[in-house]
Amino acid sequence: MTKKISLLIIFVIVCNSNTYANNTRFDSLITAGIDQIYNIKLSEAKTTFGLVIKEFPKQPAGYFFDTMILWWKILLDFSNEKYDDQFIDRLEYVIDFCDDILDKDPKNVDALFFKGGSLGFRGRLYAYRENWFDAALDGKDALPLVYSAYSADPKNIDVQLGFGIYNYYASVIPEKFPAVKPFMVFFPKGDKEKGLKQLDYVSRDGKYAKIESLYFLATSYFSIENNYDKAMDYTLKLTSQYPDNPKFQSLLGRIWIRTNSYKTAAPIFREIFKRSNAGMPGYNDVAKREAVYYLGAYYDEISKYDSAKYYFEICETASNKLDEDEESGFLINAGLYLGKIYARFGDTKKAIKKFEQVLDYREYNESYSKAKKELARIKDQH
């Protein structure tokens, strides 16, 4: 839920720089660096944006995109907060850098763009961490910068990303999550359909913001609109261009799962599992845990219970390692699956222990009633 709410105050502003628009070197470095980020080649991206900073030290783009490398480190494992302080410090550096430019030139398009983008990403992180007050303040400060940047350069397609995100979420989120409504007093009214059209426009014709728009549309159609055909269209564009991005890859797998196409999803999650074991960049324990859970569900569905047991036990081990504040849905559901598999294999003692373990966890998606039902069934059979 928090991930959906957080996007209310995103103003991801990427710039088709006026100052350097005709500089082939600048443009090629920025484009290459963005591609490296989305390909999870983060070390290479660090080098690329280091060159941008060195060769164009008065332009905020290099500092901003270099900070986005940290954002993707956070995104690949959002439960881990070790990069938060560093990310916020770097964003504040970009904000101060842009303020220095705006003090001398209040209409500088680049400074307006990247200050707005930095405020948006800081607010996004605050919202993910449920710091709603600071998130709302950053959103309130970012929105006028978006309008100012657009007024200064109305031909910039990428700026429509910020408008699209705002229009969509300002319309959708208050209805889905009433707790957010008090924060909406800070903002103008949204327009969902207009926002989706703006985002689609950027996804087709944007320069630097095209991929961000595609990802936003894919996740929105998947998790909010429940329009899996649309989600699939946008996600396939992402995975075809960035086949080594685990976030894009797992989204594709989850769309197939949501449409009950476990057989189609299985090879995707098997590849994620393989890459995680091989230590490929971005394929961490979080990606591995999700992959083995869905592989377990697939094998359970086709009645290959030995294989299902294998993957669910890996999922359980990974979850015990990853879950810090509370038990994850992966751990709880894997426990229910394993209990039923143990019972099916005739290992009553192990099955009872597993269901009782589920009852010790927090309740998740009627897990208590499901565990109690299975325990009662075992009791009736014996």
Image: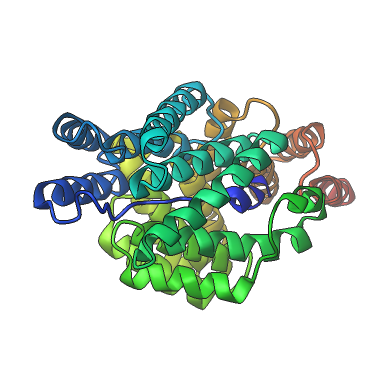
Whether residue 260 is visible to the viewer of this picture, yes or no, is no
Relative placement, left or right, of 37 versus 262 is: left
> Quick check: 274 above or below 158?
above
> Quick check: 370 above or below 224?
above
At horizontal 63% and vertical 25% (from top left) the residue drawn is 324
Residue 114 in the image, given as x and y percentages of width and height: 40, 43
* Residue 172 found in image quarter: bottom right
Relative placement, left or right, of 223 versus 21 is: right
Relative placement, left or right, of 381 versus 252 is: right
Q: How is the image coloured?
A: rainbow
At horizontal 54% and vertical 31% (from top left) the residue drawn is 317
Residue 148 in the image, given as x and y percentages of width and height: 48, 54
> Quick check: 103 above or below 365?
above
Residue 51 in the image, given as x and y percentages of width and height: 15, 33
At horizontal 10% and vertical 47% (from top left) the residue drawn is 25
Furthest residue in direction front, as rendered? 104
At horizontal 43% and vertical 28% (from top left) the residue drawn is 96
Whether residue 146 is visible to the viewer of this picture, yes or no, is yes
Q: In this view of the protein, which residue sits in the foreground, 246 or 57?
A: 57
Total numbered labels placed on residues in the image: 0
Relative placement, left or right, of 169 versus 254 is: right
Q: In this view of the protein, which residue sits in the foreground, 280 or 12?
A: 12
Residue 135 in the image, given as x and y percentages of width and height: 64, 39
* Residue 222 found in image quarter: bottom right
